[in-house]
Image: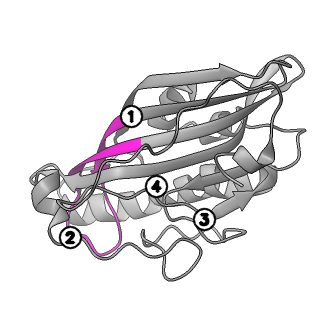
Amino acid sequence: MSKESYLFEAGMHEERLALVAQKTRGVTIEWGARGVFEGIEGARRTMVDIENGFKKFHAQLMKKAFPEVNFPDETSGMLETSLIGTLVIEIAGDGKTARGVWMSLMAALGTEHGKEKPVAVWVWWKSAVDFVKEDGEWRIWHYLKNPLFATPYSKDWVENSLNMPPIPTPGTGKPLLSGHGGNPDRLTTKLYDPYRITRIPKLQPEPPEPYETFDMTTSYCF
């Protein structure tokens, strides 16, 4: 997971995809409200295609915001860097699968549709992953990642939460995040309750407990 984070910061999305299970059926990748992407091809659409598409949006906005600058590459100025920690990992008694949860703080340069200029943002993420062992190597099998809060650097998360739009019911309604596309295989199934002044702290995701063999009914993303 640390390697995945380093590769993400470097924009090495094909290399990130190589960390996903290649031979095991049932791969699912679900980040925020992008939807659920299934199988290795679905993983490619969200982990590679969507991220590469962001480069075009980024380049267009950077040129618009800084017309006097000669940018050497479409990725010039991109920043999505994460500090991950608080890991809890359990390996199955049979040694075939594992489960883990993480929290991470991301500093990013936001360049999205509708923005007039790039914006520095903080995002606090919570991740939950089921792993499977393939040819002696651990691979990402089910990957669920949701924000606890996302706020511009110029605002604190309390102030930002006061005007936050309603969170759609998972599996219905419009996506929480706009402009991601990617043709998900299914609508979002799980959204954590993001920070608001009325939010009650919750154990989301639940840290894994010791287990003998994998049970799909307890999967973090299915």
Q: Earlier in the sequence, mark 4 or mark 3?
A: 4
Q: Say which quadrant the N terminus sits in.
A: top right
Give the residue type that dot 4 points to: Lys
Dot label at residue 125: none
At a point 40% along the width and 43% down the height, the residue shown is 125
Which callout, 3 or 2, points to the residue nearer the camera? 3
Magenta extent:
104-125
Give the residue type that dot 1 points to: Ser
Category of crowding for the residue at label 3, using alpha-carbon neighbours closer than 10 angstroms: few (below 14), some (14–19), many (at least 20): some
Q: Is residue 90 left or right of residue 2?
A: right
Mark 3 lies on residue: 189
Q: Secondary structure at mark 3?
A: loop
Mark 4 lies on residue: 55
For residue 184, above or below residue 121: below
Give the residue type that dot 2 points to: Glu
| Residue 74 seen in this snapshot | no
Percent x, y for residue 168? 44, 76
Q: Secondary structure at mark 1?
A: strand
Q: Is residue 120 left or right of residue 35?
A: left
